[in-house]
Image (tube, rainbow, N blue to C red):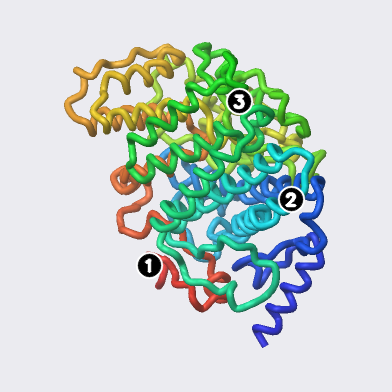
Amino acid sequence: MKKIILSLGVYLLIGSFISCSSFLDEEPVSEIPAKNMWKTSRDAKAGINEIYGLFRQTMRENYFYWGEFRSDNVSPGAPSATNQERIIKNLMTTDHPSTQWTDLYKMINQANLAIKYLPGIDMPSIAERNDFLGQAYAMRALGYFYAVRVWGDVPLFTEPNEKFSDAIYKERTDKNYILYNIILEDLKKAENLMDRVKNLERKRISICGVWAIMADVYMWLEDYNMADQTISKISNYKVNNNTTVFVGFDPDIATWRKVFVEELNGKASDNTPENDEYTTKELIFLIHFNMDEVGANGYSYMYQWFTGAGNRACVLSNAFLSKLDDTDKRKNLITQNYQNGWELNKFIGGTISTTLNKTCQVAYPVYRYSDMLLLQAEARVYMGKWEEALDLVKKVRDRAGLPTPTSMDFGSEEDIINFILDERQIELVGEGRRWFDLLRSNRWKETMKPINGMEQDGNELFPIHFSHIYENPKLVQNSYYSN
């Protein structure tokens, strides 16, 4: 009976644009049958658009659940924010919404469809078709990169699920296999396919977006030389091989402020990737929200979860605030004391009416240039290039009005790495990076044990949602949550 019900769910899904729950919470199939799509240039554009739409849907809440709320950046906010509080206090169970991978695998499946069918579409521009294909490979890589960081080993699909079969029931694949053989290989393919003339996107993946993901993956794999080389590609990249820098650093703190309160806010949809509509060069790739495009799903939670004592999901923690120097120019731009809590004010720039919460169109930065500079600094420390590393950190600290120590001020490699990680924590607060930094540097136990008791191996992973385990008998729960 179960199989009959699940099969029916699949066939209902294939004929509609709206996915059903139940079986497809395990591995969703195409929302539009391939026989009705992937025929024309217009289909190709729509198919690529859907990848980003599904990524936005995936990350709307999980941007904070997966990358921010488990870290020492935040403390619980309003009593009504129970789902957020459970993450912050390390009280996760297998029914928490952040433990579902449904939407993430929908995005991966859409990327698989694009990878399968794009090469067969006769488009007016081969360069554009290749660029679409490069974006699909990069987004599949990014999807799996989130998956292995959140759950560890996960089911691996490199072909689209287009109809029901037993093939959708898969065991989990070793995360290192996925990192080396899928994620990195996808990014290398994307690097060769991207259009470096007309793709000047920041709402989508550009060549600099590919390199940003790749550098992040190399850092995760402790391949510091390759991370360093890849970030240098971003720094040295010139648009159309001329002198125009696409991504770069701006030393003015006023421009830094503008990035978050203006550049990320309320941008229109973009059908002209050859035109860069951003005045800043700081942003590399972001999750774009636009209510005109997707209605209610087009607003973000940047206001709703961080403002107003009655409904805010969290406030900045004492652990984070203790690292903020009073002379740091970012301090009053990052936070404000409002209604008995230090709010994350970085993306807002003042107070705002709660009536505007559900019209918020602030984008979420996934990668930006300061992130890359500080990653490169970290890589160079591990390579023994301490002074070069501190020269990179100095750019960020100079903008913040802070002095930068010299290499002689540090007694060990660990000391200077901790210094850089602290700088990353302040510079990137609210950008979904801190928890992953703690995981990558293996500092999650020492950092979080005094705060929420995290100390047991396996607790760093998220549990797999109980429905996935129920639907797929080949899945095994992460050990920390297996009882």
Quadrant housing the C terminus: bottom left
22 or 325: which is nearer to us?
Answer: 22
Tell me the SS state at disc 1.
helix
Residue 479: mark: 1
Q: Mark 2 highlights which residue? A: 47
Counting residues from the start of the chain, the first of labels 3 and 2 encountered is 2
Which amino acid, mark 1? Ser
Q: Mark 3 highlights which residue? A: 260
Check the image and report above or below for 225 versus 96: above
Contact flag, marks 1 and 3 (Cβ < 8 Å):
no
Give how far apart the Cα atoms at labels 3 and 2 are: 30 Å
Give how far apart the Cα atoms at labels 1 and 3 are: 39 Å
Counting residues from the start of the chain, the first of labels 1 and 2 encountered is 2
Which amino acid, mark 2? Gly
Residue at (42% x, 57% y) in the render: 461
133 or 414: which is nearer to us?
Answer: 133
Which amino acid, mark 3? Phe
Residue 128: % across, % down? 71, 38
Q: Disc 3 or disc 2, which is closer to the eye?
A: 2
Can you see residue 343?
A: no
Q: Is the residue marked by circle 2 packed among few (<14), some (14-19), or many (20+) residues within 10 Å?
A: many
